[in-house]
Image: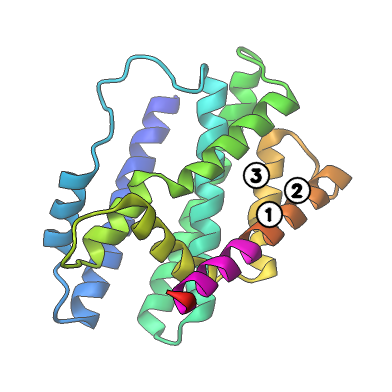
Amino acid sequence: MFQSAAATWAQEEEQHGIALGRWADLADSTFDFDAAFTHFKDLYRIPVDATHSVLGSRSGELCARCVVESGTSSFNSAIRDAVDEPVLQAICRRIASDEYRHYQLFARHLARYQTLEPLTVWQRLKVVVSRFKETSDDELASAYHAGNPREDSYNCKRASNAYAKLAMALYTRDHVRTAGRMMAKAVGLAPEAWLTRVFTRVLWWGIALKGRKLRASIVTH
């Protein structure tokens, strides 16, 4: 049951990249999506030969997927609300809707696997925090570097900071609140629970603070 749903999810995720890549090719004649994607694959490789979950269980993996879908849905919503170009707005609106539906898919299966491989609220919160911190890892940094070629060689920290500086400027408090509530629900918290409110506020403060620090570092250097 889950494998069939995951196969459909994978196809839709590929379609998202194709749609955005096609838009970028048309919007900027100097951009070559196929070349950028090839460069990205040279920089970053997913460990497809892994035989064990790095999170220890299927429940942990599904919780982590909920975090990712929360982030992608909110990010595409933030792009949609920040730009004026109607085609890009339409693409991001559809992707954000898809990603929210994907979140619901993983949340449903997380609830099912919780009966087989239960994780406590604190264990799931640990997964959420761990997965959120991975936004600074090589995957996003490599994608940013591949899509924005430079004369110097790839540097994870530099590319990650450059990406975060641009991305975090798009978010509003509402985008972060929505994403925070989605993540909190994956943890097992009610949307209006006091811990959910604390979590979303901390998430917003963290994004706002990091954004200010990154913008300041660019100005001073």
Work out whether mark 3 precedes mark 1 in sequence or the reverse, and give the earlier one: 3
Q: Is residue 142 left or right of residue 151?
A: right
Q: Are marks 3 and 1 in contact (CB under 8 Å)?
A: yes
Of badges 3 and 1, the one in the foreground is 1
Please report the residue visible at 23 percent of the width from the left and 54 percent of the height from the top: 154
Disc 1 is placed on an element classified as: helix
Q: Amino acid at mark 3?
A: Met
Quarter of the picture holding the C terminus? bottom left
Other-residue count near label 3 (Cα within 10 Å), few / some / many at <14 / 14–19 / ≥20: many
> Disc 3 and disc 2: Cα gap in Å?
9 Å
For this rendering, which residue is in front, 26 or 32?
32
Task: Report the residue that reaches farthest toward the front.
Answer: 220
Location of residue 144 with respect to 32 vertically, above or below: above
> Disc 3 and disc 1: Cα gap in Å?
11 Å
User: What is the number of the mark on residue 203?
Assistant: 1
Residue 200 falls in image quadrant: bottom right
Q: Are marks 1 and 2 in contact (CB under 8 Å)?
A: yes
Q: Which residues are magenta?
A: 208-219
Colour scheme employed for the rendering of this structure: rainbow
Location of residue 68 with respect to 130 vertically, above or below: below
Q: Are marks 3 and 2 in contact (CB under 8 Å)?
A: yes
User: What is the number of the mark on residue 183?
Assistant: 3
Residue 124 falls in image quadrant: top right
Q: Disc 2 marks which residue? A: 199
Other-residue count near label 1 (Cα within 10 Å), few / some / many at <14 / 14–19 / ≥20: some
Q: Amino acid at mark 1?
A: Leu
| Residue 105 visible in rendering | no
Disc 2 is placed on an element classified as: helix
Expressed as whole percent of the image width and height from the top left, the position of residue 172 reads 64, 71
Q: Is residue 110 left or right of residue 161?
A: right
Disc 3 is placed on an element classified as: helix
Quarter of the picture holding the N terminus? top left
